[in-house]
């Protein structure tokens, strides 16, 4: 009994004897093709020539490169504004005429690429300053809480 219809669709899936036979024949053909044509191509000499050419070009490039130039100072391409009450933002170009009144604050300048990293290195310990400020604020909070307790009693 044949489990395949006239279009080759099988009802048995992987267990179909006809499909198993086709797969076995295809594997035999593949094995036969790979064993008869399994001679390695002579690629040692061209590869060695390419490696030598690559090293020569790298040495030439290293010799001919210019020293690194400092990045040019960027000009802002736009300005970001933020409304003081609503928080709405707007972007204006340098040549634009805008109707920004006193409630609009300049948030920042906008550039085409990120600016250079900040090179500021303070000569003092910034963490110590913050710790001192936090201690001062904690002391002030304690004093205010003590005053509040004394008023309530």
Image (cartoon, grey):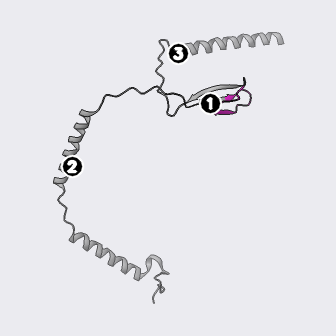
**Element type at mark 2:** helix
Above or below, comparing residue 41 to residue 149 in the picture: below
Q: Residue furthest bottom?
A: 1
Of 42 and 6, nearer the camera is: 42
Residue drawn at (19%, 56%), measured in percent from left and top?
Answer: 43
Q: Label 3, label 2: how many angstroms apart (C-alpha)?
A: 56 Å
Q: Label 2, label 1: how many angstroms apart (C-alpha)?
A: 53 Å
Q: Label 3, label 1: how many angstroms apart (C-alpha)?
A: 29 Å
Q: Is residue 119 left or right of residue 137?
A: left
Q: Residue under circle 2?
A: 50
User: Could you tell me residue 80's position as x and y percent?
Assistant: 62, 30
**Element type at mark 1:** strand
Asked if the residue at tag 1 contacts the one at tag 3, i.e. Cβ–Cβ closer than 8 Å, the answer is no
* Earlier sequence position, callout 2 versus callout 1: 2
Q: Nearer the viewer, mark 3 or mark 1?
A: 1
Figure quadrant of the N terminus: bottom left
Residue drawn at (32%, 78%), measured in percent from left and top?
Answer: 25
Q: Which residues are magenta?
A: 82-102
Q: Main secondary structure of the magenta part?
A: loop
User: Could you tell me residue 82's position as x and y percent?
Assistant: 67, 29
- Regarding residue 120, the answer to whether it shows in the image is yes
Q: Residue under circle 3?
A: 126
Of 43 and 127, nearer the camera is: 43
Q: Nearer the viewer, mark 3 or mark 2?
A: 2
Q: Is residue 80 left or right of residue 6?
A: right
Above or below, comparing residue 11 to residue 106 in the picture: below
* Earlier sequence position, callout 3 versus callout 2: 2
Above or below, comparing residue 25 to residue 140 in the picture: below
User: Could you tell me residue 152's position as x and y percent?
Assistant: 83, 13
**Quarter residue 148 falls in:** top right
* Earlier sequence position, callout 3 versus callout 1: 1
Residue 80 has which mark?
1
């Amino acid at each position: 009994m044949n489990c395949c219809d006239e279009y080759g669709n099988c009802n048995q899936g992987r267990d179909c004897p006809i499909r198993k036979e086709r797969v076995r024949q295809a594997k035999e053909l593949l094995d036969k093709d790979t064993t008869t044509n399994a001679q390695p191509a002579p690629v040692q000499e061209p590869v060695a020539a390419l490696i030598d050419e690559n090293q020569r070009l790298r040495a030439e490039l290293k010799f001919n490169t210019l020293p690194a130039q400092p990045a040019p100072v960027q000009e802002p391409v736009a300005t970001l504004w933020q409304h003081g009450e609503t928080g709405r933002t707007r972007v204006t170009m340098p040549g634009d005429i805008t109707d920004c009144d006193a409630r609009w604050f300049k948030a920042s300048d906008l550039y085409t690429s990120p600016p250079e990293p900040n090179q500021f290195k303070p000569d003092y310990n910034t963490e110590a300053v913050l710790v001192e400020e936090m201690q001062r604020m904690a002391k002030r909070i304690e004093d205010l809480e003590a005053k509040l307790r004394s008023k309530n009693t």
